[in-house]
Amino acid sequence: VYCETTNGQELPHGPYKFKVAYDKLVIASGSEPLTFNISGVKKHAIFLREVRDAQEIRRKLLLNLMLSENP
């Protein structure tokens, strides 16, 4: 995953960019998501609470795969 700082302030050398390597996805069900009052998180994130949420993640992944194959 490629990350970039977005603290809303201009940094003298631009945003800090870094890569986070991982090989496992952790799904923690039964908890309340923390959004840390970051604007846009509730609108753009998918919170996994029910089977319907998992189906939505799958649908979005497949849609993005199809779109990437047809530029």
Image (tube, helix red, strand yellow):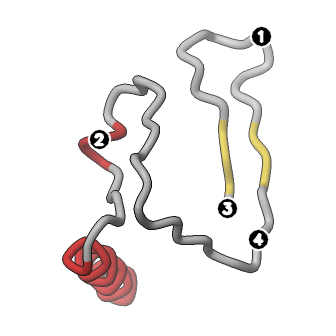
Q: Nearer the viewer, residue 47 or 6?
A: 47
Q: Position of residue 12 (x, y in %)?
A: 77, 10
Confirm or deny contact between disc 4 and disc 3 (CB under 8 A): yes
Cα separation, mark 1 vs mark 4, equals 30 Å
Q: How far is mark 3 from mark 1, CA to CA?
A: 24 Å
Q: Earlier in the sequence, mark 2 or mark 1?
A: 1
Q: Residues within 10 Å of mark 1 (few under 14, many from 20)?
A: few
Q: Position of residue 52 (x, y in %)?
A: 19, 77
What residue is shown at x 75% (from left), y 79% (from top)? 23
Mark 3 element type:
loop
Q: Is residue 30 above or below residue 15?
A: below
| Mark sitting earlier along the chain (1/4) | 1
Query: Residue at label 2?
Result: 42
Mark 2 and mark 4 lie on one chain; the one further toward the N terminus is 4
**Residue identified by numbered label 3:** 1
- Asked if residue 62 lies left or right of residue 29, the reply is left
Q: How far, Cα to Cα, is label 2 from label 1?
A: 30 Å
The disc labelled 2 sits on which kind of residue? Lys
Question: SS for tag 4?
Answer: loop
* Apparent side of residue 59 relative to residue 29 in the rendered image (left or right): left
Tag in front: 3 or 1: 3
State the mark number for residue 12.
Answer: 1
Say which quadrant the C terminus sits in.
bottom left
User: In the rendered structure, which disc, 3 or 1, sits on the residue that comes first in sequence?
Assistant: 3
Q: Are marks 3 and 2 in contact (CB under 8 Å)?
A: no
Upstream in sequence: badge 4 or badge 3: 3
Which residue lies under the disc numbered 4?
22
Label 1 or label 4, whichever lies nearer to me, is 4
